[in-house]
Image (spheres, helix red, strand yellow):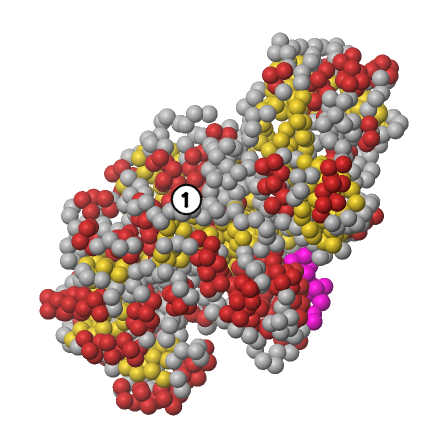
Amino acid sequence: MEAILALEDGRIFRGQSFGATGERTGELVFNTSITGYQEILTDPSYAGQIVVMTYPEIGNYGVNPEDVESRRPFVEGFVVREVAPRYSNWRATESLGAYLEAHGVIGLAGVDTRAIVRHIRQRGAMRACISTETLDAATAVARAREAPSMVGRDLASRVTCPEPYEWTEGSDDPAPSLHVVAYDFGIKYNILRLLKRAGCRITVVPAHTAAETVLAMDPDGIFLSNGPGDPEPLTSVVENVRQLIGRRPIFGICLGHQLLGLAFGGRTYKLKFGHRGGNHPVKNVITGRVEITTQNHGFAVDADSLPDREIEITHVNLNDGTLEGMRHRSLPIFSVQYHPEASPGPHDASYLFDKFVRAMQTRREGGETP
Amino acid sequence: MPKRRDIHKILVIGSGPIIIGQACEFDYSGTQACKVLRREGCEVVLVNSNPATIMTDPDIADRTYIEPLTPDILEAIIERERPDALLPTVGGQTGLNLAVALAEEGVLDRYGVEMIGANVRAVKIAEDRRLFRQAMQEIGLEMPRASYAYSLDEAWRVIERLSLSYPVIVRPSFTLGGTGGGIAYNDEEFEEIIERGLEASPINEVLVEESVIGWKEFELEVMRDLADNVVIICSIENVDPMGIHTGDSITVAPAQTLTDKEYQRMRDAAIAVIRKVGVETGGSNIQFAVNPQNGDLRVIEMNPRVSRSSALASKATGFPIAKIAAKLAIGYTLDEIPNDITRKTPASFEPTIDYVVVKIPKWAFEKFPEADATLTTQMKSVGEVMAIGRTFKEAFQKGIRSLETGRIFSPPAELSDEDVRRKLIIPNAERFYYLLHAFERGMSVDLAAELTGIDPWFLEHLSEIARERRALQHLSLEELDAPRLRSLKRQGFSDRRIAHQMGVEESDVRQRREALDIRPVYNRVDTCAAEFESFTPYLYSTYEQEDEARPERRKKIMILGSGPNRIGQGIEFDYCCCHAAFALKEDGYETIMVNCNPETVSTDYDTADRLYFEPLTFEDVMNIYEEEQPDGVIVQFGGQTPLNLSMRLWRAGVRIIGTSPESIDLAEDRERFGRLLSRLGIPQPAHGTATSVEQARRVAGQIGYPVLVRPSYVLGGRAMAIVYNERDLEAYMTSAVAASSEHPVLIDRFLEDAVEYDVDALADGVDCTIAGIQQHIEEAGIHSGDSSSVLPPMNVTTGVLEKIRDYTRRLARALHVVGLMNVQYAVKDGTVFVLEVNPRASRTVPFVSKATGVPLAKIAARVMVGRKLKEFGLPEELSVTPFFIKTPVFPFSRFPGVDPILGPEMRSTGEVMGVASNFGAAFLKASWAAGVRLPRQGTVFISVNDEDKPEVPPLAKRLSELGFRLVATRGTAALLQNHGLVVQPVYKVNEGRPNVVDYIKSEHIHLIINTPLGRASFYDEKAIRRAAVQYQIPCITTMTAARATVSAIESLHREELEVRPLQEYHRLR
């Protein structure tokens, strides 16, 4: 079936649909990961976005029940150059097209994805409309322009869990000894899997859970998750985070890192087209080592806005010099802009989970940890 | 980390001659390394025996030794040069083995030379399967179950102990590209392969291993720096499953059928491997097998150096692995090195690509009809092509047409389904053609997957190609509408293929396509999937929306490359193309390179200003021409590949510079060229042409036997033969004419016992400079590419030389040669005959350039854009001192059972050069460099034909004086005894035992001089020569070569070997 991708600046791409039919709008962004489309589709951080894969052959290994990062896909649309006519992998249970159809996600194939990427690179991420219904260019562009902007939009509240729950997936080996309360702003399962593997019992709580409620659970540490969109509208969350500073070890990833930055009094800003992929070089300025990281963010913390006396920059993006990680100079609080949980992507930064666990253990043993 | 300050002078070891398993990729890596190290202020000393390389150009390194790659010679160079460090990782297995030998013999310690990149310990762990296996166990990675054996008995015990079932893999230790290894499917094969493997291994060791045949095969290219940062540059998936050497597999980048979970597991394993093995800096290649049923992962092996795959990965991603590896070796870290392509981002990242890369090997089985053409774990291909497309289908189809098979594959008529299945089950060079054929016949993807073990994801795409092909058969040109044609082009179909399926002309499809305005665009290879702007015009064609070529308006010249390496056309032509780019760049032109061979220097994005990684077909070249609108196109440097296109391009209005395609065509057209020679009064052997058996018989009858027969328009003497009688002629005609029906067969009088000369010359339409007159050491009848030759010529009268010069100049004028020209002469009884003229760059251009110190190809390129020879201040003839000898290298050890006799059909894969102050010493060095270990002492076996007999006694006397024992067959022995020499007679193979082959096999013979005796003793001689190859005993098959060999051994006795860099030889002039 014919389908259209219309950008707010009037550019049109026409191709064939796969997956669901219908019409959606969202911010058009690209991801440069070669593998991992299933993880990307189910990453709640993509809520409100139409994702273009730069790698042209997608769907090759089908879809399986294990490689999901949340309960369902969150993308508004999925754009690829070529969708596999047949999938092949021993774990696969269905095709990408069937999966998207089952979850109501519109797929678009056969378009010049490189042209889209170059367009976004030059003009910035922008709103777009993906449709199998409105094939008229002008109408589709008008729909794109009607879509809400990413800036100032609270998407975390839309994707967070409705109620607190205990994470149970994975083996109890080692037996959990530390209790982590994890704020769910759109948390990826692999964060929970890795915390579990590191010996934690995890309570996942909704985005707007009050600080005192969290402290009442008597956690050993607090985790601030990744999530979609702009951190700035999440003012009450920032306030909660501010209240938690100094009470427990805190580890933040992506949106969690940005919220922490705001709580420390810093500023955030929107990047031209963001960082989305699995090959971003980040330098750990403490050790001098380079980590190849998974990234997925359209906003960033302005390093210059952070209070230098309290906050130390720990990680820097080697491509564009943006802030990738920070820590409190005296409290066991640290965060990274990238995704150490990978999934998809390289495992270079998984040491951060051990670091979090050590910080919690130290606290429990009554010691001090910067 | 700052650059190391303690390293000033670095020794770089090259990989020697082009052989199967080690080709131009190491010229590419070595050249990159040398350039980088010099730019960093290091003094570079280079050793390589291969004169056809860019790296041995005198301006690439500070001191360039074209010397044999042996520990003794290397020690002499180290003693003379005293380098601080040795970089062993850019010269292939040869460089690595040599470095280890130097370390183990204490040479490096003695002279205080540090190995950088990989230390000896790391190399040993990676190379020694036992140590590697243990290392993998320690980091919890699995390898296939296996154990070592040193005898057949032990091998049987391994089978029992590990309870292995067939198939079983046999891997000899320390051999190149798996030489001597194989897969055994039964007891008989097992015994055979074990024995061959034990033989091939320098330490007589083989690994008997659990089979992972049919598992999926992957490779990761990994880089590490001194700060222990590790990145993966590229993943490569072998389309052919485990069981076929990766060099013989069609491979794809990036990996296609792995989930992220599986890929990351492999990535973690690769990082663990490079750390465990301890490769400190640089690139490594790690191979994995994955069980398609359950995802089980096995580590297969690791190369602790840059490799063929890393050259491929560099070209596939735009990330220059060898260049970066060289920087890491002198202490830089990855984050300190900028990415050339994006300029703004560092090299410490993992390239991501937004296209599919397919590599397809090219084989040369037609040259070795007796060879086993089954693909196994031992590499047999001689070259490869790479193609880039936005999808697998597009890249695959571009790759197939890059192979230049010269024809559309059509399976033999009346092929049964059973025949097709067999072609799919047993891996062979044409398997992919048969797969497409099987799909055209309606085979299911599932069945094909079962028969081949190839992942259904790949097969589904092939079956789609087959489906499209079939559908095209029922289509008329009018029905080929824009959406349909666009879809076909997006799937990679060539105009030619579409035309073939529809039964119309290629030009019809092109016209239709242009009328519908369906034209390719050019995308950039940028390491980052367009996330950052690319500053490097490294381009490939595809049918998308946006063109990124952005041609410039400068004066520009397009150079057509030589495509995949093959026997007869290889690195020498790439060398010429690179030189054209270098020279014209220096002169201010924009240079545009078109080529599809990932191993080469020409496809380095640094070589020309713009690189189009594209098939060299009319369609693809015309498209680029139209895009770029260059001021000129050079076709005479890339060998036969661009020449075959030149007439069509010229007719299509392409501005071809240099010698006109008409002249090239005239020189190739026997009849017209014959008339030209007659008019010029230049003698040529009597000749004629024939298109039928009848005609051939008549022509040969007039000319008189023996005759030399060959199809027209071939390179490397393909299908060329010397025919002694009518019966053989008929046999030849029935096979050769069938092979090439478009062109007639050429029949020439064969000049027995003539001496051949190869002349390279430069001409500008007015003046002509003779660059070199090389004298063949083998006599006439042996292909010039297979003959050793010497510069300057020896024992030749000035009268003959004058004639050669005179003819060359007159031919250059008559053919209006602008650029390079090569003429082959045969001199018999004082008469100089012209055998052929090639008004283009020849295989010997790099050799002559190295010998004379004059960059011939650069001057030729400049002349082609309008400059005059006078401007370069060259003499009428270049001088050469002292003696430079070129010697070919053969792949016979790869093809057991093939008769290693030399003839008019070229079979060598590469060449080496020997330089010395006298002929004997130069020949000795060339022989060593070619891997021929001439004995200092021992026993020589002599058996020659009657014509050669008069020459034997003086030669035998010299050998005897050198202390050799003489052994000869009855006839020759009697002759030598009559001359007062002590000779031990020996049986021929059919006379009784122990015969000469028994002597060879029990290693009682150290040198063989055996000139062909004719048909009767054919079997006998073949057995001798095969045994010689097997036991690596020098086997000389011509008297001239025998004389040269004896001179070389005399030189060995005089112990006069010295090493000297090319720059010093050139300064002597």
B766 left or right of B95 in image? left
Question: In the rendered view, would you say A92 is above or below A171?
Answer: below
Question: In the rendered view, would you say A333 is above or below A51?
Answer: above
Which residue is label 1 attached to? B606
Q: Position of residue B988 (x, y in %)?
A: 34, 76
Label 1 crowd (10 A; few <14 / some 14-19 / many >=20): some
Q: Residue furthest left?
A: B798
Residue at left 16%, top 58%?
B877
Q: Amino acid at mark 1?
A: Asp
Question: In the rendered view, would you say B433 is above or below B206?
Answer: below
Q: Quadrant of residue A205?
A: top right
Q: Quadrant of residue B137?
A: top right
Asked whether B541 or B224 is in front, the reply is B541
Q: Main secondary structure of the magenta part?
A: helix
Q: Which residues are magenta?
A: B442-460
Q: Position of residue B682 (x, y in %)?
A: 18, 75
Answer whether residue B1039 is visible to the viewer in this image: no
Question: In the rendered view, would you say B813 is above or below A242?
Answer: below
